[in-house]
Image (cartoon, rainbow, N blue to C red):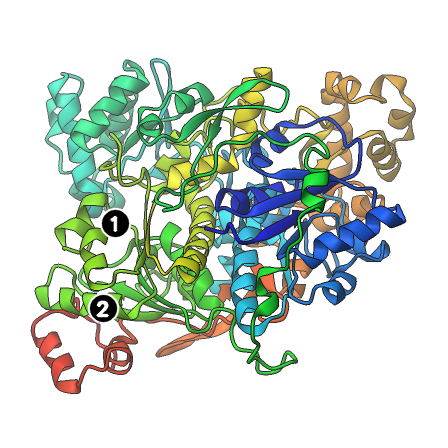
Amino acid sequence: MLSCYRVLDLSDERGLFCGHVLSELGADVVHVEPPGAGERSATWLAYARGSRSVALDLGDGTARDRFLELVRGTDVLVESAGPGTWEARGLGYEELSAVNPALVWVSITPFGSHGPKARYAATDLIVQAAAGSVDICGPLGRPPLRTAGITAWAHAGAEAAGGALIALAEARRSGRGQRVEVSAQRAKNLTSFFTLQAERVGHNRVRRSGSGFHLCGVTFPFVWPCADGFVSLTVALDRGNKAFLDHLVAYMREEGAIEEDLAAMDWTAHLRAVRRGDLPNTDLERLAGVIGAFLGARTKADLMAAALDRRLLLVPVSTFEDMLDSPQLSARGFWGEEGTADGRRLRMPRHLVRGAPEEPRPPAAAPLVGQHTEEVLAELRLPVVATATSSAPLDGDGEPAALAGLKVLDMMWVMAGPSSTGVLAQYGATVVRVENAARIDTVRLLAPYYEGRAGRETSVPFGCINAAKLSVTLDPNNGAAREVILDLVRWADVVTESFSPKAMKAWGLDYESLRQVKPDLIMLSSCLFGQEGPYALMAGYGTMGAAIGGIVQPTGWPDQPPSGPYGAYTDACSPRISTAALLAALEHRRRTGGGMYLDQSQIEASLHFMAPAVVDHQLNGTVWDRLGNDDPAMSPHGIYPADGADEWVAIAVRDGRDWQALTAAIGRPDLGDDPGLATMPGRRSRSGEVDAALRAWTTRRSPADAEAALQAAGVPAHAVLHAGSPEDPQLAHLDHVVTVAHHGQADRIIERTRVELTRTPPQPSHVPAMGQHTEAVLGDLLGYPAERIEALRAAGALGGEPDRS
């Protein structure tokens, strides 16, 4: 899809995922490395596949000239060296854009290229603490947990890939490149699912609940032990999910594993009575115990088979072996055996999404240093946009939005899908979001809530991921509404949907039907397992995706079951791939005139984020299992209590220099002078002693004071941010949170999209009320007369639209 583009990748492991995404979508990715670059890591082997390597010593004048020749023919440059690094070498954006005005320069940094924390020392743990995601991960009574297996850098790299493609789309119109900036702190913050804003909007701080959800004094775990590991089971007693509980109870009854009085219980009514105080919680305790005993006697395979047959909200908590042997991934051809440059054979993830019309390139191993130097330097090319005709202003005033003119019909649900189209909307695409007031989208009911109260217009997550969209209400079950949807398809460049595979076909709105009315249509279908395979029809949430996708298993404490990350974690991974895939498909249509159907499995997309851990497991036998906050390469490395209730600070020591700086900063030079603690293995062997010294120091300081003191010494450290923390000055500097309008209600604060184009930044104008734009879309975009709109309303086609008066 992107075969016409060249990407120069100057990044280290913090930026490699950006190049990987662009390469998987067809771009020619060329790594520029110093001669004799070090040993190849699992991250390199996973993310540099299909790319090429050029070795150049940029301190040498001749090599520098050859590098500038490469830049002249490059479309995108990716770097992660840190603020000011390339400028100090005379090779910053200003210098290189003078060589190639169309160059898109992508910077991936821990905290941003400017601001009070731009030059902070950082590791993955530090960024996760600063992002607000660790505070809500793990069980109460223990320190907050980082998510293992997926780094903040992967989130930043995926965000950067989408940003690069937005900038390229804009450059096609203007003929000019620009900077694309991604802060890993802001990118990883998406996995906190907007909980950092809770107290700002009048909602209570969200607390860690990794052990499960607590219902009237009874804990129902998220992760349950079974005979050969763990399973993720969602036990929901509310009316909306009652059918899934009924299926589980019927299963247990058939197996003789539940008492008849529990099996016959109306649990929704019973729960209301317990909450009123009319009944004790003893039957809830019995239910939790019966479920635990039932699951504990059965294997993951048996329970998964039952889940498929009986429609249970249950999946296994996958190990690496489970993922590599998954029937679903095998049926979809996700794993492919590939060789490394030194002859080893590994199973690697294949497609980011399925459905690209071009023949995939044959698998190519991650390159050796300089393997393609002469080949690449001999190629003469111009950047793709070099011949573009600019009709845009020559300065930043009045710039058209980056994606102005792009038209998207958004039929997505909940969070994963709408997050991707939300990025397009904030960058100027006209995104028409179809809702049905008779069946309210779950995301409209998710906490935290504006004004601290639940309601269909008060969800912070809804506001953040749907800002700048147009909301129309249509009922796809209504024949007249279907005709409206077909007109919207004719209007749109892109259609996106995230229903179950059978839903769109039942409505006559599947790709084969829609391409009859718009042959060059680009359509993306995104669901948990994808459109095909033995698990395709299984209903599920992103929490289940994290479990079966291998994200839950490595996150937790060694002496406890997996805690897993907070929330529907795959809902923060897959939309970044969706955004990039849609923009790549649009580029393909521009070149060929052809449409495209993209079949996205949210689990498959998320597994690309975990690819280095999968490679490490195959190469070295490394099992990324529950280590708490320990790290195999750094010590000390953890989250320590600070002054105040449930207040914490993250600290990471990368090497001997960090260790000496840390011991001096905490007033313990004796530890720094101890030869037994001079090495990482030595510190690890005496971790109890080291951690006690750190706790004695951190507990006497606020998180912010501890962070400031250690960062001043050059030690990676950061307060664990949460909703009650003082406003983070770096996030404030980057305008992470802005205020926008809301129809008929008070203005709303939202978190902006996480990628920043410096010349054509995002413009989140408003949060749409349900159905707010129905008449405007039907009348202005589709040209319907008022009489037809009234007829549609009378026919019930407008989805039980809410009163907008």
| Drawn side of residue 520 relative to residue 50, left or right | left
Q: Amino acid at mark 1?
A: Phe
Residue 581 appears in the figure: yes
Q: Label 1: which residue?
A: 499
Q: Quadrant of residue 369?
A: top right
- Above or below, 499 against 755 in this view is above
Q: Label 2: which residue?
A: 473
Residue 647 appears in the figure: no
Q: Position of residue 325 (x, y in %)?
A: 38, 20
Q: Position of residue 218 (x, y in %)?
A: 33, 33
* Residue at image point 80% right, 43% down: 710
Tell me the distance, in whole angstroms, between the alpha carbons under discs 1 and 2: 16 Å
User: In the rendered structure, are the residues bearing label 1 and label 2 in contact, judged by CB atoms less than 8 Å apart?
Assistant: no
Q: Amino acid at mark 2?
A: Thr
Number of other residues with Cα within 10 Å of mark 1, as a class: few under 14, some 14 to 19, many 20 or more: some
Number of other residues with Cα within 10 Å of mark 2, as a class: few under 14, some 14 to 19, many 20 or more: many
Front residue of 449/593: it is 593
* Residue at image point 36% right, 42% down: 354
SS at circle 2 = strand
| Drawn side of residue 236 relative to residue 340, left or right | left
| Drawn side of residue 280 relative to residue 577, left or right | left
- Above or below, 370 against 713 in this view is above
Front residue of 1/299: it is 1
Disc number placed over residue 92 in the picture, else none: none
Front residue of 748/150: it is 150
Q: Quadrant of residue 444?
A: bottom left
Q: Quadrant of residue 697?
A: top right
Q: Earlier in the sequence, mark 1 or mark 2?
A: 2
- Above or below, 63 against 173 in this view is above
Q: Position of residue 45 (x, y in %)?
A: 60, 29
